[in-house]
Amino acid sequence: MPNLRDNPKLRKASQGLSNWRHSFTRQSMPVRRLRSLTVMFMVCASLLTVRLVDVQVIRSAELAESASSFRTRTYTLQAKRGDIVDSSGAVLATSVERYNVGVNQNLISSYVVTDDDGKVTGTGAAAAAAALAPLLEVDQATLGGTLLGGQTKSTFVYIAKDISPELWREINALGIPGIEPEQYMKRIYPNGTVAGNILGYTGETGDDDTVTGQAGVEKSENSVLTGTDGSLTVQIASGGAVLPNGEKTQVAAEDGDTVKLTIDRDLQNTLQEAVDSSVKENDAEWGAAVIIEIGTGRVLALVDSNSPDPSDLSATDPDDWGSRAVSSPVEPGSTGKIITFSAAVDQGTVTPLTVFQVPDSLTMPNGQTIHDNDSHGTSTMTVAGILAKSYNTGLIQVGDTISDETRFNYMTSFGIGSKTGIELPAESAGILSDYTTWDNRTRYTTMFGQGWALTTLQLGQMAATVGNGGVYVQPHLVDSTIDSSGTETPTVLEESHRVISEDTSQTMINMMQAVTDSQSTGWRARVNGYNIAGKTGTAQVADENGNLTKRVGTFVGIVPAEDPQIAVAVVVYNAAGAGYGGDVAAPVFSDVTTFAVRQLGISPSTQPLFKYPWYESEIESDDK
């Protein structure tokens, strides 16, 4: 290989080539840099273009909505829950507008107070507290601390709850930035405990604290009473203040419908006082009563002892919050004999003047021995007399004139063992086993009101059916619903059905008038000027150990007997002493019926009390 040092020509040529290479390199560097920058610019431009298309085209609606959500706030406009009113329109439950008040701690610092000359006299949380404390009746220093907040500010902290619209207007007139309302509807019951067992109460449920009915009519009619909430959407500034000229969208709330009950408020109150008085005087566990309008099924009053005030439930034992009148069945005792007598008369196997030998103890063909409550001599008595004296030994002979199946069918037709459909939750159907399960003793005890059970409402309905010419009409509490336009929709009842004939109905009413005779069991149920058709009852009740140590006293009556208008049933559970229905329940009937006939404008009786002969000797005497 030639050595450049030994060849001057080659050395010169090589030097020239090197100089050219260096010169070319110096000239190409700026061009390469320019090309690189150009490529980078184009990439960035492309990315920005893609991003712009994504933002302005592909996700424009989504991003616009997101941005809007940061500058808007939506408030719920609560619908008013519908009122519950009595038969005359008196308000039993209603909703009133109330406010909670909160502070946006980010805005309170902008509050400024000036005097008439425009001189600043106070600012911020301290000045706001000085203005608000007298209105809210709270400590000014404590309020000031809440308004000011700590290092981390909140957009809403409560400073007052459950204030009136009038007070909120006074607060709002101060114009303090950051003081904001939270409107809601508060449920109130202006009559205290009156009808508390019927009305029930409301409570908040679900994640959104929706107010719903928890018991009584509030629960059963919740879908009718509940309105549809509206909304108000406004735009806000970065600090949370509402922009006066910002967009505003409002959807009006739709209030709930009014529920009109069949209840008469004054009659309800009087019956409540009478039941409470009997429970207290007789040291009973509880009492219940019902008044039903004969022919329509309208329940004019339905009470339970120690009825709660729905506005102050904590003042009443939770066991008393519901309605035992529809949820707690009891053995009717001798009031249940009405069905046995009605069935036999309706089947034509006996008449009021059919006679039986009636001892105080009787052994039947199947070997079962039945006793009367009190000892008495053997007498030849009419069916009417057996009812008036309420002798079990006579009653089982009457019941034996028809089959168990026939009597069972009458019981179910009267509604025993089936819910009435009353507009209250937790209604009991009562207790009635099929006749095929009755043993030798049960077939007799069921004749005189033991071995099966019914509610106070069912007891009243039994009498109302007899008083209505033998036709069962569904009892109901809700008369109608009224919407916001004033349109009233009456309650639609189930189809009525005949239980006993009209003649049997009249015969039973005539026989039951003897119950208020001075020699009968229900004389304490008398109402001055009015003929009463009724029946007393007393049944043994098992205690916690299964021993028959308790009693339930009942009375049911129809007024007036010659032109039935109302049926009243009373139950007093486990009264002290004997607890006979004639002693603990009949006086309640007398007290409330005396008021009811005046309240309802029922005319006095114009004919004497009807009375069949009680004994065979009286029939012979009448014949002579």
Image: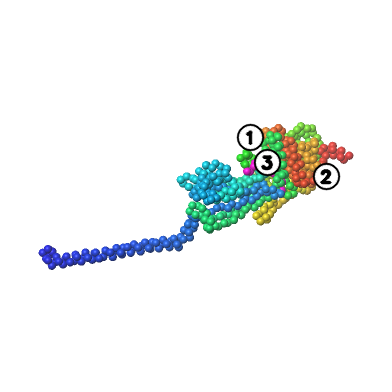
Which residue type carries mark 3?
A: Asp
Q: Nearer the viewer, residue 371 or 57?
A: 57
Badge nearest the viewer, 1 or 3: 3
Note whether residue 294 is visible: yes
Residue in the image at 35% along x and 63% along y: 41
Label 3 element class: strand
Determine whether label 2 and label 1 are within 8 Å by CB.
no
Q: Position of residue 604 (x, y in %)?
A: 80, 44
Label 2 element class: loop
Magenta span includes 611? no
Mark 1 vs mark 3: which is more N-terminal?
3
Q: In this figure, which residue is indicated by the disc labeled 1?
A: 544
Badge nearest the viewer, 2 or 1: 2
Q: Residue furthest left?
A: 6
Residue in the image at 62% along x and 47% along y: 187
Q: Position of residue 19 (x, y in %)?
A: 19, 65
Left or right for 190, reference 32: right
- Colouring: rainbow
Around disc 3, counting alpha carbons within 10 Å, would you say few (fewer than 14), some (14 to 19), or many (20 or more)?
many
| Residue 446 placement: quadrant | top right
Q: Quadrant of the C terminus?
A: top right
Left or right for 24, reference 102: left
Mark drawn on residue 304 = 3
Left or right for 236, reference 580: left
Q: Residue furthest right?
A: 624
Which residue type carries mark 2?
A: Thr
Q: In this figure, which residue is indicated by the disc labeled 2?
A: 606
Q: Position of residue 60 (x, y in %)?
A: 46, 61
Instruction: State the extent of the magenta-drawn residues as a range.
Output: 298-311
